[in-house]
Amino acid sequence: MQNVMVTGAGKAVGLGFNLALRYLEEGNNVVATIRKPCKELDELKEKYGDRLIILTMDIGKTASVQAAADELSAKLDHLDLLINNAVTVSRDCNKGFFDADLDLIAGAMDVAAIGPMRVIKAFYPLLKKSEGTALIMSISSEAGSISKCYRTNMIDYGMSKAALNMATMNLYNTFKGDHSINIFCVHPGWIRTDGRPDNPAPLSSYEAAGILMELFEKKRYDFDGHRFITNMNEDYPF
Ligand SMILES: NC(=O)c1ccc[n+]([C@@H]2O[C@H](COP(=O)([O-])OP(=O)(O)OC[C@H]3O[C@@H](n4cnc5c(N)ncnc54)[C@H](OP(=O)(O)O)[C@@H]3O)[C@@H](O)[C@H]2O)c1
């Protein structure tokens, strides 16, 4: 039984909610972070009681993240797994360079790339109190690979995930030699996270979450391997 925290878990069709659900189903304690109330998460709370803690947190704001960490510290003595899942994109995400408002990029990056770092910093004391090796899994994307980039749109998203990957590598170096904590960034596969049946992505969020759960436990004690991996446990180029 682990204490698992998932950010951005307040959308029932999304990956974060389904990761929270999967970990609950497997008997773990789950901290699900949201920005606004989520009916389906409230239903899980009724079903799983004390095993689910719902925490309000805006990862774009350091004060909000720290307040959430303080609140959790009063309820839970450690965390074994942190999944940085929350993301945002600008309204111009699908536009190309000449049409996109470039001033929107910084806001997206502040949440999607710096947000996970805020979370890691604020919850680090709880992760350090894990009995074994605490694991940080940041949900990245193939879109964050610089060497494999083929797109001319999704500039803010690609830049955010590339920056998240860089942050992961930097923190890996920071934690190196300390086997009480490990960190990876993961491309989670192509997923119908909008819940639309006409979405051609092969995986439902529930299916993707199940695959990731297995992967995460395989990687917990891998301190030397490549840091950017896919849901199929393949190394992916930065
Ligand atoms: N779908 C795919 O095929 C695919 C592929 C590669 C990677 N991914 C990654 O997989 C992850 C999950 O994808 P998804 O589509 O399920 O994500 P999503 O629904 O777009 O976002 C996840 C959650 O992030 C929350 N969020 C947004 N801004 C936030 C903030 N400032 N503070 C805290 N939470 C915030 C949202 O909360 P609200 O509900 O309040 O807006 C939302 O519930 C993402 O990291 C995504 O980049 C997905």
Image (cartoon, rainbow, N blue to C red):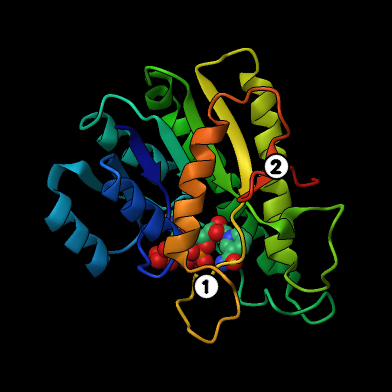
- Quarter where residue 112 is shown: bottom right
Give x and y (percent) for residue 91: 61, 76
Residue at coordinates 33% horizontally, 32% vertically from top-left? 2
> Dot 1, crowdedness within 10 Å: few (<14), some or many (≥20)?
many
- Quarter where residue 138 is shown: top right
- The residue where tag 1 is placed is 192
- Nearest the camera: 195 or 138? 195
Q: Secondary structure at mark 1?
A: loop
For the residues labelled 2 and 1, the Cα–Cα distance comes to 22 Å
Give x and y (percent) for residue 40: 25, 67
Q: Is residue 164 visible?
A: yes
- Nearest the camera: 39 or 98? 39
Q: Secondary structure at mark 2?
A: strand
Give x and y (percent) for residue 237: 81, 46
Label pair 2/1, CB-CB below 8 angstroms: no
- The residue where tag 2 is placed is 228
Answer with left or right where residue 155 lies relative to residue 47: right
Task: Report if the beta carbon of the residue with label 1 is closer than 8 angstroms to ligand 1.
Answer: yes
Task: Report if the beta carbon of the residue with label 2 is closer than 8 angstroms to ligand 1.
Answer: no
- Nearest the camera: 125 or 63? 125
Q: The C terminus is located in which quarter?
A: top right
Residue type of the residue flagged with mark 1: Arg
Q: Is residue 84 visible?
A: no
Residue at coordinates 20% horizontally, 32% vertically from top-left? 75
Residue at coordinates 55% horizontally, 15% vertically from top-left? 179
Answer with left or right where residue 236 lies relative to residue 21: right
Give x and y (percent) for residue 88: 55, 63
> Dot 2, crowdedness within 10 Å: few (<14), some or many (≥20)?
many
Rendered position, 231 above or below 3: below
Answer with left or right where residue 19 lies relative to residue 221: left
Residue type of the residue flagged with mark 2: Phe
Q: The N terminus is located in which quarter?
A: top left
